[in-house]
Amino acid sequence: MNTPAESTRRRRTGLRAALASAAAVALAATGLAALPSSAVAAADGLVVQYRTSASGASADQSEPWLKVRNAGSTSVPLSSVKVRYYFKADSASAAYRFACSWAVKGCANITGTFGTLANPTATADRYLEIGFTPGAGSLAPGADTGDMQLRFHQASWASLNQSDDYSFGPQQSAYGDWSKVTAHLNGATAWGQAPGGNGPTDPPDPTDPPGEAPTLFDDFNYSSHTDPRINANGWSVRSNSGGPGVPGATWAPENVTFVSQSGNSVMNLETSTAGTGASTRHTEILTRSMKFKNGTYASRVKFSDAPRSGPDGDRIVQTFFTINDLKAPMADDYAEYDFEYLPNGGWGEPANILYTTSWETYRPDPWEAVNQHTSDARSYAGWHDLVVTIDDNQITYYVDGQHFGTHGTAYLPERPMSINFNQWLIDLEGQPSTTPRAYDQQVDYVLHVKDQVLTPAQVNAMVGSYRSAGKTFEDTVPGS
Ligand SMILES: [Ca+2]
Ligand SMILES: [Ca+2]
Ligand SMILES: [Ca+2]
């Protein structure tokens, strides 16, 4: 996820500042890969109790009321806790909205976002993930959160079917331990049993291969950030201040450089800090035009788990994404599709994690996100082929030719977007030292084919033919 600052979104104008804590917690939500298949209640674990006052097989809204208890012997900051309620969506395109009716800890301190299971079952393909802002405080040993009277409903307010929902328990008219809801502490399962996987989702069939479809291809064959062809080819190297990320940081065009590797030019985004806002240098390059909507987006990106120099540990975000402008809080015509790699964790995650996120919309304050995301909590250091396709039905992500996640109709773009790469620090808490350090994210090429759903193999073939033809840039996508 990207973040907002001010009234536009995070990166471009900098959304992050406003959202910082709430967004971070809300977005952090996924970690599908971390879901174990066995139930656990660790020694320093958590216990989740559940009841519902909406016990009908069909209901206007689902009402999972929850309490989380610290069953361990040490205090637990609630901001490190996530709780997941699993359900079967009413349709592939159904969109859901979360709400908190009342909570002892305060509804303002509770976040709810929706995720998609990589391995759907008959009773679960989505989940509601509950998180907490730092304002929720900590749970002492033996203490619980008290009542959290939560609910969710279809965005359309059509009734929802609860009888096929994994976590639903119509007989739970009073609070009781409930292992069909899971709790996670710093990303590790601390309570309950997630629904079992049943094999990866098959990728969609490709449509027609590309012919003369309008295409943007850029092999990033430039001499420096001042190369006039960068501007001529439609790119802007960011220098304006603002979010996302560390307050007071600047966006440094001179840290966008180009190096030749065996005759192939590679763009390097260097992000550096010496532990203060004023010393922090973020980097971003984006198309000036928002003219990209349905079709295939692809890039070859090198993520890194460690700094090129200096001490490791910063909560850095390495990205490839498309985005347009949020015209008003919760405006439906907002759109954003992200690959976001966090090599050192962040947003409540303890370690490396790759997110793909499709956004319907959001509200900066109070933070509310309407998105679907899929994540994989492991190292993605090194070069990776990233592909996302958008057609009239769904958004599909691939990493290195493998299906990574599919998101539904409700998250399709209403308006065209820009194409962006950036690297930035969420905060300075991951590495408190003032010793200078610098991180690299590299980008080999970007490809967009308008209105065509390409397979990863077709993407590679197209890039290969541009290179065989000696063509390092082409843009035939209409629009300005
Ligand atoms: Ca259902
Ligand atoms: Ca939208
Ligand atoms: Ca290249």
Image (tube, rainbow, N blue to C red):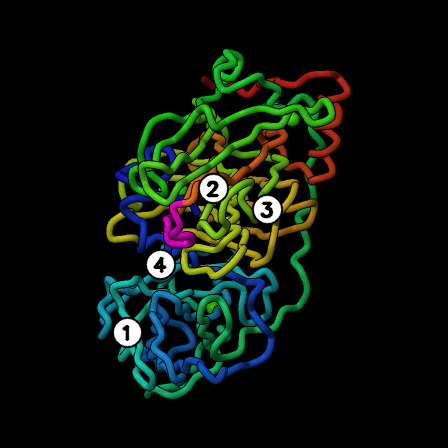
Q: Percent from the top left, x then y, of residue 408? A: 51, 51
Q: Amino acid at mark 2?
A: Arg
- Residue 11: in magenta span: no
Read off the residue under disc 1: 149
**Dot 1: what SS?**
strand
Q: Nearer the viewer, mark 4 or mark 3?
A: 3
Q: Percent from the top left, x then y, of residue 332? A: 35, 43
Q: Percent from the top left, x then y, of residue 456? A: 69, 40
- Mark on residue 328? none
Q: Amino acid at mark 4?
A: Arg
Q: Which residues are magenta?
A: 427-434
Looking at the image, do the residues carrying marks 4 and 1 touch, with CB atoms under 8 Å apart? no
Read off the residue under disc 2: 437
Alpha carbons under labels 1 and 2: distance apart:
45 Å
**Dot 2: what SS?**
strand
Q: Nearer the viewer, mark 2 or mark 4?
A: 2
Read off the residue under disc 4: 97
Left or right for 318, reference 72? right
Answer few, some or many: residues within 10 Å of disc 4's Cα (few below 14, many 20 plus, some between 14 and 19): many
Read off the residue under disc 3: 397
**Residue at the image point whose x is 27% and y is 46% from the top:** 18
Answer few, some or many: residues within 10 Å of disc 2's Cα (few below 14, many 20 plus, some between 14 and 19): many
